[in-house]
Amino acid sequence: MKCIDEVPAGELKGKRVFLRTILNLPTAPDGSVTDVFRLKRGFPTLDYLVKAGAKVIIAGYFGRKGESMRPVAEALQNLAPHIKMYFFGTPFAEAPNEAAALREGECLILENTRRDPGEETNDPELARLLASLADIYVGDSLPDFHRIYASSVGVPNLLPAYAGLLLRDEVQNLMNARSPEHPSFAILGGAKFETKAPLIRSLLSSYDHLLICGAIANDVFKARGLPTGRSLISKELPGEDVLDNPHLLVPIDVTVENSQGQAKVKKPEDVEPDDKIVDLGPDTVALIAPHLAAAKSILWSGPTGMYENGYIHYTQAIAELISKSEAKKVIGGGDTIAAIEKTGVAQENLGFLSTGGGAMLEYLLKGTLPGIEVLK
């Protein structure tokens, strides 16, 4: 996989570059963008291309229902007011004329690619249309690259294709996380054991310790015959190969919330029928603290609890412990970054922050993704 910075800047001058970047951002009910973390992470690639004098066609999808890309385009323009950007909010068939009119260092932001049904089916006709807009393809959107879409798999099959600066860093750090230095410590949260089971087994074989938290910890409690009250439980429960694995750690205390919204820390065996497990507890943080301090590699994916309901205290405690570690650290997946941002822990002390959600977990399991394979 070659990175775009391996192409001499002089050779990019005047070239039309199709930049498949991360545009799928969280929004408020009014449609405004609420978090530009992913835009900031992807900006160095865009900045590199603009400074080289390329004509950049920016593409990606936003939301699940074909929402307009306009609020994302506005957020990107606010992030880089010095760059001349045009938002193209009409059918892609009219895009070639707009792309041809670009001047060096200018950008054209295409409408949401999911507005065309050919995007999700990797339709060859749509891929050819999008590829006709540019001379070079740059892939820089790890969160989307586990999907076989026209803009991320079809287009790079038709153009000289390169990785963006962010994707290069994502792949390098996630590759290292798949083969950690020892001692190593991994934390995995979230829900749906049935979808995470292969990764859990993989991490148990490669990491010295794996702490399971969040809703999938409830599945371990349930499988061991412990009470789980009103807690979220997956369709599939872990088997003995997971439950009896010596590398597995689960919370030794939990925070529960009763039906009146009152929270209390309990031992797992003391959870009552009216309780819902919403986080781990302080004894669990104390249990893993020495492991984090000794680790040379740390991987963390998934908040420890229901941070969206205000349960971020123990996520913060773990983030603070990790921020003091000298280990190689990779953090991402799901809502982990959003939860950490709420804690106020300085991100610069947390190692590599991945933009990937499900794609990050899939890469950790498989070592590649369709949107990465097409760049090799």
Image (cartoon, rainbow, N blue to C red):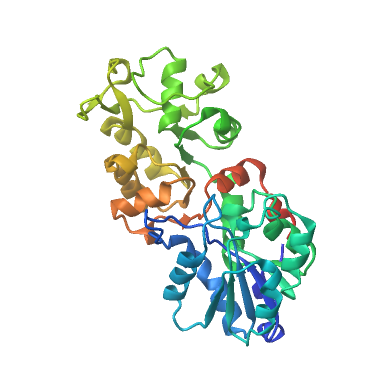
Q: What is the residue that sits farthest to the top in this orientation?
A: 225
- Residue 257 location, x and y as percent? 26, 28
- Residue 216 location, x and y as percent? 45, 29
At x 61%, y 51%, the residue is 175
Front one among 269 and 132: 132
Instruction: Say which quarter of the image contains residue 290.
Output: top left
Instruction: Say which quarter of the image contains residue 141.
Output: bottom right
- Residue 218 location, x and y as percent? 41, 24
Q: Is residue 298 visible?
A: yes
Front one among 344 and 229: 229
At x 78%, y 60%, the residue is 125
Front one among 30 and 39: 30
Image height check: is 350 above or below 235? below
Image height check: is 76 above or below 30? below
Q: Is residue 25 left or right of residue 203?
A: left
Image height check: is 301 above or below 222? below
Please state, as top left, top right, bottom left or bottom right, where the C terminus lies in the image: bottom right
